[in-house]
Image (cartoon, helix red, strand yellow):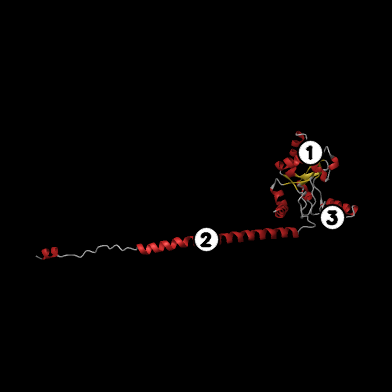
Amino acid sequence: MEDKEEQNTIFDIPVAQRIYYESSNSDSFKKLFFISPVILLLLSLAGLIITKQLKFNFIVKEKNQVEKIHSHSILGHLPYDEIAQEKLVYIEPNIRVHIDMSKSLMKMKKDAREEGIYLVFLSGYRSKKLQEDIFYSLKSLRNQVAAERARVSAPPGYSEHSTGFAIDIGDANNRNTDFEVEFEKTEAFKWLKDNAAKYHFRLSFTKDGKYVDYEPWHWRYEGSIEALKIFESSNRRSKNYKD
């Protein structure tokens, strides 16, 4: 009897209720739709400000580095240590250069000759003592103050020639242009301008130089880690003033 009563008992079974939030969700979507452009604009502005600040900081850092470099210069010339004698080799009876650049230099001369261009080497490594004699004797001979002489000759301790990585080059068929700006009109210079970079040589003192006069005959080697380190400060200063 009890079983039948239990079977007849009516149970209230919970029924899931669906609650509609359409109105609420629609309002939120509309707000997000209108706010999103504003958020994107603010993010873009923030990004632009950060980018400009980073660029400004980089420029300031670069200028500070250049000012630091210039503070160590004398009459526009940067200081260079004299290369150790054991790193020098003779390429001609009276001309020595850094061993790292000797092969490239001689190959450049050989390749130029095969194209009918005859390069002549005028000056390679110079000791500080020799640079001192050149700087002060010629300054006195020409009745020039130090600043005037420095436009065409580095003070001792400030010459690229002391590194062994600098070479003065002339045209064997036009020796009257040795150490003269007129060298730029020779076939030798034209060939160097078109081909020297292939052998890792670069013109040191260009027409747009700020401190030193134009020297179309003076080239430096940048084909080794040691050479790049030595001329890093000079390259950074040149880039900054050109920019």
Determine crowd level at label 2: few under 14, some 14-19, many 20+ residues with C-alpha closer than 10 A. few
List x then y, in percent, for residue 225.
69, 48
Q: What amino acid is at disc 2?
A: Leu
Marked residue nearer the N-terminal end (3 or 2): 2
Q: Secondary structure at mark 2?
A: helix
Q: Which mark is residue 41?
A: 2
Say above or below: 231 vs 177. Answer: below
* Amino acid on which disc 3 is placed: Glu
Image side of residue 152 versus residue 13, left or right = right
Disc 3, SS:
helix
Taking the spot 41% from the left edge, 63% from the top edge, the residue there is: 28
Which residue is label 1 attached to?
A: 187
- Label 3 crowd (10 A; few <14 / some 14-19 / many >=20): some
**Residue 148 badge:** 3
How many angstroms separate mark 3 from mark 2 (CA)? 57 Å
Ranked by sequence position, the earlier of labels 1 and 3 is 3
Label 1: which secondary element: helix
